[in-house]
Image (cartoon, grey):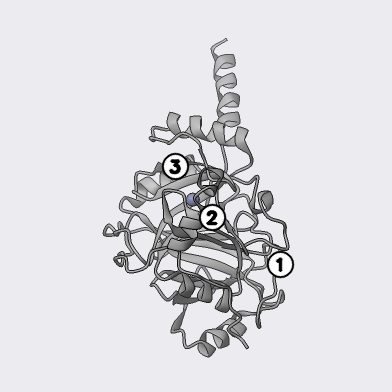
Amino acid sequence: MLLGVNYQYQIVGEILMKQTAGIHHISAIVGHPQENIDFYAGILGLRLVKKTINFDDPGTYHFYFGNETGKPGTIITFFPWINAYKGKVGGGQVGVTTYAIPPGKLSFWEQRLQKFHIDYRKTERFGETYLQFEDPHGLKLELVERQEGERNNWTFGDITPEVAIKGFAGVVLLSVHPEQTVQTLQHVMGLEKIAEENSFIRFQSIGDIGNLIDIKVAPQERGSMGVGTVHHIAWRAKDDEDQLQWENYIREKGFGVTPVRDRNYFNAIYFREFGEILFEIATDPPGFMVDESFGSMGQQLKLPPQYEHHRSQLEARLVPVEVRNLDK
Ligand code: ZN
């Protein structure tokens, strides 16, 4: 009888074990919005899939860049703050954001960085070569060749689908308490530890993009939020029902988690893990075509309904920006 009870408990335990597909989006703080657009659209060739405002600070923009459709796992979002303080990259943050490019295309990207006079260095990790560089505001980025992940059919300037960034390869996490973050990745987010090398541990999620998460083994000195730093990393939930399960699950695991917040293009919950990195869980639906068509995404300033009647005042406060082809 006792055995039966234990058996049932294990089954229940397995059902309750949750796994995220991987990274949904990454949100960072940067400087001038036009410099931000020139770098991510003009040089990296990502698509500006949404131009909206910071819902908590409606006098500033919120930009979303991704692949042609803005699929989860490809989206980086920016809060551009003109004249704001520079942050410090450190513990409690995503240290490096890693993008996946098609196999054999690293030399194309090396030449492209040279063309735009962007300093870079090559480094090796887990048998892969990484091209590391910074955006104009100090955000740390890297490119790595990956077989996985569908091709990005967005064409802009000299960037064609053959060479285009597919989306996130992963991230390097910097934790104030790495052993705690490791526990959270394994036992809360449901990632699998697949390798350990020198100063890094590598985890894998079940998706095919945004799926390899590296963490520095050594505790990192605490970073500070500001220009050039990542604000949070969001993980994928399948839908609203899945997200409610995540909310309960995270609370049961002992974290303080926010109620669901409507972000127009996904629903979001947030919690700070014990290594001090801010985690979000975001739903895959509805996505960026909820208020614009595929062809027109990113062209107009989109406002949530509560701000629509203030459109003219809000637009007057925002600096004009445009997506420019820098290869002409
Ligand atoms: Zn977010």
Considering depth in this image, is 216 or 321 the residue closer to the camera? 321
Residue drawn at x 53%, y 35% as measured from the top left: 246
In percent of width and height, residue 245 lies at: 56, 31
Rendered view: 240 above or below 32: above
Quarter where residue 240 is shown: top right
Q: Secondary structure at mark 2?
A: strand
Tell me which amino acid carries mark 3.
Tyr
Q: Is residue 202 visible in the rendered structure shown here? A: no
Give whichever of discs 1 and 3 has the lower sequence position: 1
Dot label at residue 25: 2
Q: Secondary structure at mark 3?
A: strand
Crowding at dot 2, Cα within 10 Å, few <14 / some 14-19 / many 20+, comes out as many
Give whichever of discs 2 and 3 has the lower sequence position: 2
Left or right side of 119 for 322? right
Rendered view: 152 above or below 104: above
Residue wearing tag 3: 270
Q: Ligand 1 within 8 A of label 3's CB?
A: yes
Q: Is residue 110 visible in the rendered structure shown here? A: yes
Dot label at residue 151: 1
Q: Ligand 1 within 8 A of label 2's CB?
A: yes
What is the quadrant of the C terminus in the image? bottom right
In percent of width and height, residue 180 lies at: 36, 45
